[in-house]
Image (cartoon, grey):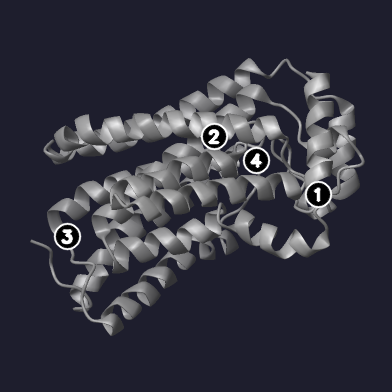
Amino acid sequence: MQSIFEWGARLVLAVQGMGSWALVPMKLFSFLGTEEFFLVLITLLYWCVSAPLGIRLTFALLAADTTSGLLKLAFHTPRPFWTNASVDVRAIETSYGMPSGHALIASTVWPYVAYRLRRAWAWVAAIVLVALISLSRMYLGVHFPHDVLAGWLFGALLLALYIWAERTMAPRLAKASLARQLLVAVAASALVLLLGALVLMAIATVTDPPAWVEALRRVVPPEDIAIPRDPSGLISDAGLILGMGVGLALARRSARFDAGGALWKRALRYLVGLAGVLLFWRGLTLVFPSGLDGLGMLLRYVRYALTGLWAVYLAPLVFLKLKLAERAS
């Protein structure tokens, strides 16, 4: 493995040789794989463009992010600047390296959008986005080439699995009773928590080399230091899966809405919806204690579950009540 890290670091340094002019565009491409970007994109789609496409894209994103988090823990490999001090650190990342979450998510989400649009230009755009987002992660010094390749591989496999599940399982689930749909949401969320716990138990006896920790301390401000085995991401995903799964089951019965309408109504829907998301997603951090202890993780789970429930169910109810949206047939 050491030879792979050495070869990968040389390639990362070669990519970074593009020069400082590329820093801004590369950070922009990297931003296209962040939680904040997808929060804006998916809520905009769901509330203001197409609710079905928005919800499908949401669960594709959650599947990709969860898969990335589990695989990072399972492989527990370093990032370039953990093993080579010559790598210029241009972004702060404290989790394990392989696979690249940005590459995995990009190679799942953007090709899925192209698949739904069924246009040649959409496929070209998806491929270009995947390539540029992946390149940006090497330029920023946070991923080896093999991290990116692994992200592409697992992203492509997940995309195929997601499309298969959408065709075969989703129609049956849509016709299921409310109780069964709620049970599926709870079970899916619990499965993420269980898998995360099992992976953490499996690697509990494996100690990270002290050099990795020292490398983190050299480049990451003390207030931003987080342990590579921090389960917060998986806790967040599990909470969102529960909240959105429950919300979708309820919305299909009492909050179906048309995401179209006048432009001013769409704009108001987005502002009202986003205000609620920020209230639950960020606002609750002001009153909920944080940390990696049991209470901190439980309240993170609750916070993300409430955020998901608001986005998928409670916000549409408010839209309908305020007559900012019409009921869908």
Disc 2 marks which residue?
A: 152
Say whether marks 1 and 2 touch (CB < 8 Å). no
- 248 left or right of 103 in image: left
Disc 1 marks which residue?
A: 16
Residue displayed at 29% across by 48% down: 116
Judging depth in this view, the residue of 109 and 305 nearest the camera is 109
Residue 256: numbered disc:
3
Which tag, 2 or 4, sits closer to the chain's start?
2
Asked which secondary structure carries label 4, the reply is loop
Say whether marks 3 and 4 touch (CB < 8 Å). no
Residue displayed at 67% across by 62% down: 25
Question: What is the spatial separation of the Cα atoms under label 1 and label 3, in whole angstroms?
Answer: 49 Å
Question: What is the spatial separation of the Cα atoms under label 3 and label 2, in whole angstroms?
Answer: 35 Å
Residue displayed at 52% across by 60% down: 37
Say whether marks 1 and 4 touch (CB < 8 Å). no
Residue 87 shows in this picture? yes
Question: What is the spatial separation of the Cα atoms under label 1 and label 2, in whole angstroms?
Answer: 21 Å
Which tag, 1 or 4, sits closer to the chain's start?
1
The residue at the far front in this view is: 120
Three-letter residue code for mark 4:
Leu
The residue at the far left in this view is: 329
Three-letter residue code for mark 1:
Gln
Query: Is the residue 75 above or below the residue 212 in the image?
Result: above
Asked which secondary structure carries label 2, the reply is helix
Which tag, 3 or 2, sits closer to the chain's start?
2
Picture quarter with the N terminus: top right
Instruction: Single out the mark in the foreground, 1 or 3.
Output: 1
